Amino acid sequence: MLIKTTKASDVKPSEITSKDAFLNRRKFIQTAAIVSGASLLPPFVSSSFAAARTKYPNVKKTAYGEAEKLTTYDGLTEYNNFYEFGTGKSDPSRNAHNLKPEPWTVEITGHAAKTGKFSFDDIIKPHQLEERIYRLRCVEAWSMVIPWVGIPLADIIKRFEPTSKAKYVAFETLVDPKQMPGQKRNALDWPYVEGLRMDEAMNPLTLMAVGVYGEHMPNQNGAPIRLIVPWKYGFKGIKSIVKISFVEKQPPATWNIQAPREYGFYSNVNPNIDHPRWSQKTERRITGEGGLTALFTPKIKTQFMNGYAEEVAALYKGMDLKKFF
Amino acid sequence: MAIKRSRMVFKPLVFITSLLPLGWLIFALYSDTVLGTKYMTADPIQKLDRELGDWALILIIISLTVRPLAEIFKKGELVAYRRMIGLFAFFYVCLHLSAYVGLNLQLDIDEFIKDITKRIFITIGIITFTLLLPLAITSTKGMIKRIGGKRWQKLHMLIYPISLLGVFHFYMMVRADFTRPSIYLAVILVLLGYRIWAKRKKSRPKKVAAA
């Protein structure tokens, strides 16, 4: 029997995608799979667009955000901030085909009993993949709802047995201008780095995502493995991770280095603390539908901790969130 | 007469060309709505605002190039198109501001006032818009006469600080990649440098060639 508990972060049933829309999407995916599988097509058709889409065989459904209206697959793969592929929103979908997420190695270093280099399979094989539907709130005041496939970061961390000296977890993105043409220019300081406090990393919400919509992670979304911290602004969710370190001191974070006044280490979603250049009170929900519909869609109120306060508020008890933004 | 005839051809041409960016944006929105394309991305509010601001700046810069081009190529008649280009720049600035207030802020006037007072890049944007107003108002022939050519010219030198403010507005909005505003700034500085150089050359008494 499936026992469903409703959490404060779950969303109203009124936002559920209609069955028609859902089935249409299914049909589209099937058709797309058939089309992309057809060897009759000239090679440029498949290579000019997204790489082959592969489903994960065994993904456990969870109750996380079940009722959210999802951002369409096209929406979340055509509108991205991933400066490693260019600073424009459409650059990642255009340039990410250069990335080779297979084979992939993640180096584990620092204060842990087990360290070394691990293949992508080494990292995910021992775990049950699960689907979690999370809101993603970008610091730029737009948001999406994404059905991630992943593993709770806590489960992965435990396997490497971090020592008591491991107070923070630091992450690093691949640097390879050949695969990531945006790195040919110094828009940011490469490699992109991020970090979490150990208790944030161990929170059950924190996810190592390896896919969306039951499929392998699209390159432009951070293939093959990326971080998702749903109560923090999107840029904390570092993509295409090649290194995870257990460290004693607060590790550097790319946007914090870039503009310390604008992006804090914590970067928890908070409608009461404005970005110096824009308000964080509201957000534009990106559904994937463009044109006039999106142009005239009313903005929605941003929730404290992106609606996950019940699960994470304890982490920040007694902290001045204005100071530690 | 040849000048008059060329004007009859070029004026509508400049007019239509200046409308092309707007035409493209309207078409893109239409296509995205009806055909499901993604020219304006999945976040057209942001995209539209950026595009309109970008075109406003580009047209301001083009209006600045008219006089140097006319002088360098000795085509004084080019100056006749400057007013139209300038007014189109103002038109795009108005659209840019309207899109910001109407679509981005969704007419939340409280938020708009907060933006103007609290956020320097918005403050600069509004100052730029305000400074453009007198230029747009005094662009008619009648106004030029009323003010007097010299004073009118002085007033319209405001376009240089306006263009710089516009670029700073752009700079301050960018999160990481400063390429575009840097290109705009470089072009403006070259044009400004040219103007200063040309003026000095003019005011210097001409050397009489030795007999």
Image (cartoon, coloured by chain):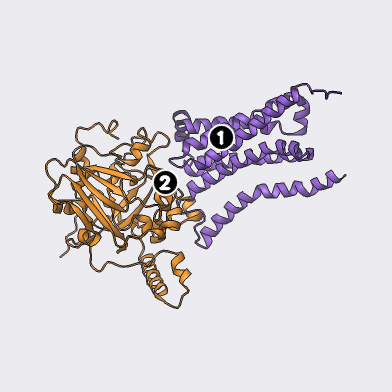
Looking at the image, residue B185 sits to the left or right of residue A92; the answer is right
Which residue is more in the foreground, A90 or A18? A90
Looking at the image, residue B48 sits to the left or right of residue A37; the answer is right
Which residue is more in the foreground, B142 or A265? A265
Residue A134: % across, % down: 29, 53
Residue sitting at 23 percent across and 37 percent down?
Answer: A250
Subunit that carries the residue with mark 1: B
Number of marks in picture = 2
Residue A303 makes an appearance in the image: yes
Q: Nearer the viewer, mark 2 or mark 1?
A: 1
Residue A214: % across, % down: 29, 64
Q: Secondary structure at mark 2?
A: loop
Instruction: Look at mark 2 in the image and give the residue it sits on.
Output: A299
- Are there few (<14), some (14-19), or many (20+) residues within 10 Å of tag 2? some
- Are there few (<14), some (14-19), or many (20+) residues within 10 Å of tag 1? many
- Give the residue type that dot 1 points to: Gly
Q: Quadrant of the N terminus of chain A?
A: bottom left
Q: Quadrant of residue A130?
A: bottom left
Q: Quadrant of the C terminus of chain A?
A: top left
Q: Secondary structure at mark 1?
A: helix
Looking at the image, residue B181 sits to the left or right of residue B196; the answer is left
Which residue is more in the foreground, A168 or B74? B74
Instruction: Look at mark 1 in the image and give the residue it sits on.
Output: B166
Residue A201: % across, % down: 21, 46
Which residue is farthest front? B211
Give the colour chain A carries in the figure: orange
Is residue B124 shown above or below B184?
above
Residue sitting at 76 percent across and 40 percent down?
Answer: B73
